[in-house]
Image: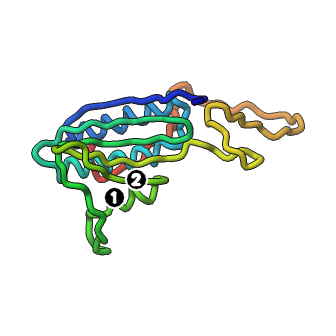
Amino acid sequence: MISHPSRHCTVELQALPSRIGQVRRILSAQLRYWHLDPLIDRATLGVTELLSNVHRHAQPDKTCTVRIELLLDRLTVSVRDHDPRLPVVEDADPLATCGRGLAMVAAVSESWGARPDGEDGKVVWFSLPTAVAGKQGKPAHPQKSVRRLPEVDAVAVEPVAVAADAPLVEHAPARSAVVG
């Protein structure tokens, strides 16, 4: 019996720098909707690297499909393109300015891989765990976790004045070398 149904989102695009930025924003919004905010930085970094590889290496075209799937306690992000050549992780020279994308995907994800998809394509994917350890070490689904604030004695607090036009500080997603 599945306690949480599968949820997914699919985006088709040309892997161009401006479109990669749009996919990052879509992925971030989808993870916020699923209450998986702690995964945003790692997921957007991973998808940026996979899409950058499509932009840089895929032939005959840059058309690809990004699929985001949440199933039970695992988020899987995959990118399908029309180039049947599977990616190869190589040791990058310490002074090289590229060649570390898949190593970064491996570092930020729980697992990753690539598989042929028919005669004219492949799928490269990575997964992230969504379970959060509870106080007793038991996994808890992020949507059902409850954060309790410590109890404190009542104290007098002076109000703080904030200008009406003061900018709000928001969390900024991780940036990549890819423009967008």
Vertical placement of 111 versus 132: above or below? below
Label 2 residue SS: strand
The answer to whether mark 1 and mark 2 are in CB contact below 8 A is: yes
Give 116 or 137, whichever is nearer the viewer.
116
Pointer 2 residue: 112
Label 1 residue SS: helix
Residue count near mark 2 (Cα–Cα under 10 Å), binned few <14, some 14–19, many ≥20 = some
Q: Amino acid at mark 1?
A: Leu
Precedes in sequence: disc 1 or disc 2 = 1
Q: Which mark is residue 102?
A: 1
Vertical placement of 144 versus 46: above or below? above
Q: Residue furthest left?
A: 60
Q: Amino acid at mark 2?
A: Trp
The residue that appears at 84% across and 34% down in the rendered structure is 156
Estimate the x, y position of residue 161 in percent, counting from the top left: 65, 30
Residues at marks 1 and 2, CA–CA distance in whole angstroms: 9 Å
In which quarter of the view is residue 66 placed?
Answer: top left
Estimate the x, y position of residue 116 in percent, counting from the top left: 25, 48
Estimate the x, y position of residue 7 in percent, counting from the top left: 46, 28
State the scheme by which the image is colored: rainbow
The residue that appears at 81% across and 40% down in the rendered structure is 150
Q: Which mark is residue 159?
A: none
The residue that appears at 43% across and 43% down in the rendered structure is 173
